[in-house]
Amino acid sequence: MRIGIITQWYDPEGGSAVLPGIISRSLVALGHEVHVLTGFPNYPSGQLSPGYRIRPYRFEKMNGVAVHRVPLVPSHDRSAVRRAANYLSFAASAAARLDLLRKVDVWLVYSSPATVALPAMMARWLHGRPYVILMEDLWPDTLAESDYVRPGRRTDLIIRMLTRFCDSAHRNASSVAVIAPGMADILNSRGVPRDKLSVVYNWVDERVFRPRTPDPQMAASLGLQGFVVMYAGSMGNLQGLDVAVDALEYLADIPDLTLVFAGSGVEERRLRESAARYAPGRVVFLGQQPIERMVELMPLGDVQLISLRDQPFLRSIMPSKVQSTLACGRPIVAALAGDAARLVDESGAGFVAPPGDPYALADAIRRMYELGAEKREELGRSGRQFYLERLSERVGSVALARQLEKAVRDHVPADR
């Protein structure tokens, strides 16, 4: 089967942008011919990746995947206007490639942002190609809750227009796959039929995210001693990482405890200032790390921290850090609510505290400390087994492929 994937993000972009590449390679491994319609790589800096310049079209063959790149406006700063230009320019460029839109049997829409559904809708209307939406974020909720828009009539109008667009995209899709059960409940409440919805958890690049033996020399070179609580990932506003620094106040009786941040983001500077003021000498910042280095750092943490603020729309998403930590077999302390909290608890990999509650998080960290190294490693192994059975590439790629195959099998062109 010829499968097309429409995604604004693709290799060599990093962070959460690696997921479309992981999905594409998994579908190739199942024997499908995969074409990706994407933009020119510029995430997360907003600057084009080395070796790229904006052109009307560029074709690449990457890991068995045919990659078709169309122009967009590069931008990932805090300007709402430039961010909108980034999203809309890709959607328009991709929708204009009518030759590519009829090239495959079915399209998979990697829906973040929601505007990427436009080319798939064009493919259906003009060429009778069915499409399946894989929803990574809830829209327009993600936009409404972001820092990029300000309340007002103009914002209300944009939200209403985007809501109508999303409703149309869902209505015309053969099916809608979501990455967390709560997302399915919300979409069903908004009129998407339950039999059109399915849960397909994201998986990780299992060549990279796997159990590793800690490197004592690396730990010594970084000054990581004693009991290490590590956060490895993006340090943005939604992560709510203040709670980890605040929790140290309640852990003063564990003098060998060190909180480590590996990563970067818009909140890094403020967290550094807070740590220097309220927890001097107890917090280490390692800065931005390439993914290969990040997975080598993870086993140096006695426990991995996962954190998200408690906002309604965040209770129905699944941060990729949950799967990556489980796949690496690391024990977890989590400041989470909703679907992500339930998954961590169900995995048996660690302890969950309410988001934004430093005392509860401190208690979870203390419990993990008192377990001892052997028991903590048992928790990590339980999480790894849970990942393999419920969240792995073997499970997710097959489920997604079945959705796409069903879309082709059941689709009736409009002109029949």
Image (cartoon, helix red, strand yellow):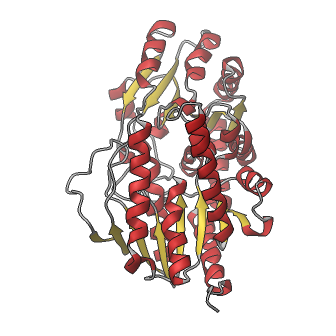
Instruction: Give me the residue at 26% from left, 51% from top.
Output: 49
Residue 324: give x, y in percent of width and height: 54, 49
Please report the residue visible at 44 percent of the width from the left and 52 percent of the height from the top. Answer: 87
Q: Is residue 228 above or below residue 376?
A: above
Please identify the quarter of the rendering in which residue 312 is found.
top right
Query: As drawn, which residue projects farthest toward the bottom?
Result: 416
Which residue is found at the position 71% from the left and 33% from the top?
Answer: 352
Residue 371 at x, y percent in the picture = 68, 29
* Residue found 37% across the figure and 64% down from its top: 93
Quadrant location of residue 217? top left
- Position of 228 with respect to 289 (left or right) is right
Q: Quadrant of the C terminus?
A: bottom right
Specify whether residue 201 is in view. no
The x and y percentages for residue 321 are: 55, 44
In this picture, residue 331 sits left or right of residue 299: right
Q: Is residue 401 above or below residue 189?
A: below
- Residue 248 makes an appearance in the image: yes
